[in-house]
Amino acid sequence: MSYNNLLSFGDVIELRLNCNASKCLDNIRKFEWKQYNPRKNINRFGLSVTSSDGTMNGIDLDSLAEYNIENGTHYLNFRRGGFFPPHRDQRSVKEQEYMRILVPIRTCNPPGLWFMMDEKPLHFQMGTAYFVNTNKMHTIFSFEDNAFMLVMNVKCTDESIKKVGELIRWK
């Protein structure tokens, strides 16, 4: 299965991969959250889960285009007024290097947080993993504090794409 084969099933694909969102939230509250993309004064924060040096130093919380594509997994904490302007994560037509898996944890649906793709709001089940085609134009805006989301940047390999295909929740 290739990345393009995966896209034939949709741009937002629910996966059979879940976590207890309340327990997850309890586990991450004690950590120090760092400014996400510190070059910009936007009310959004992150918590490194993995980084290039194996620590929780926040180095992977820089913008995807500027650094994060190399580093992996992190949580986002949108505060009221936190946002990502309209953008595409991959900005070239070269082979897809990474895919995005999101796990909404808290307040990741309207009216608290608007995740818009193709000018339509996305609606998530908290604690459920989703493959999201973030090559499409998307934007996020938070109207509430503490909207938490786990973000995984997964390297596109035959094995990882096959695994995502196996995890699709067929309805």
Image (tube, rainbow, N blue to C red):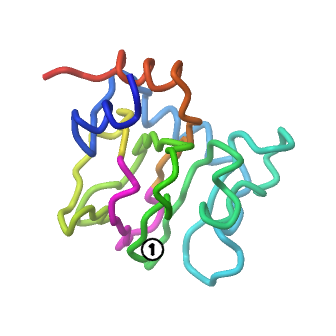
Residue that protrudes farthest toward the bottom in the picture: 41
User: Circle 1 sits on which residue?
Assistant: 83
- In depth, the one of 68 and 96 nearer the eye is 96
Residue at far top of view: 166
Residue 148 on the magenta span? no
The quadrant of the picture occupied by the N terminus is top left
Q: Residue 141 in magenta?
A: yes
| Residue at the (47%, 53%) spot, across then down | 148
Going 20% across and 69% down the picture, which residue do you hit? Answer: 119
Question: Farthest front residue?
Answer: 94
Q: Eyeballing the image, is 107 above or below 54?
A: below
Give the residues drawn in magenta, as a range.
133-147
SS class, disc 1: strand
Residue 147 falls in which quadrant of the image? bottom left
Quarter holding the C terminus is: top left
Q: Residue 75 at what x, y percent from top left? A: 57, 49
Q: Residue at x 53, y 18 (%)?
A: 159
| Residue at image point 54% right, 34% down | 156
Q: Is 141 left, or right, of 47 in this rendering?
A: left
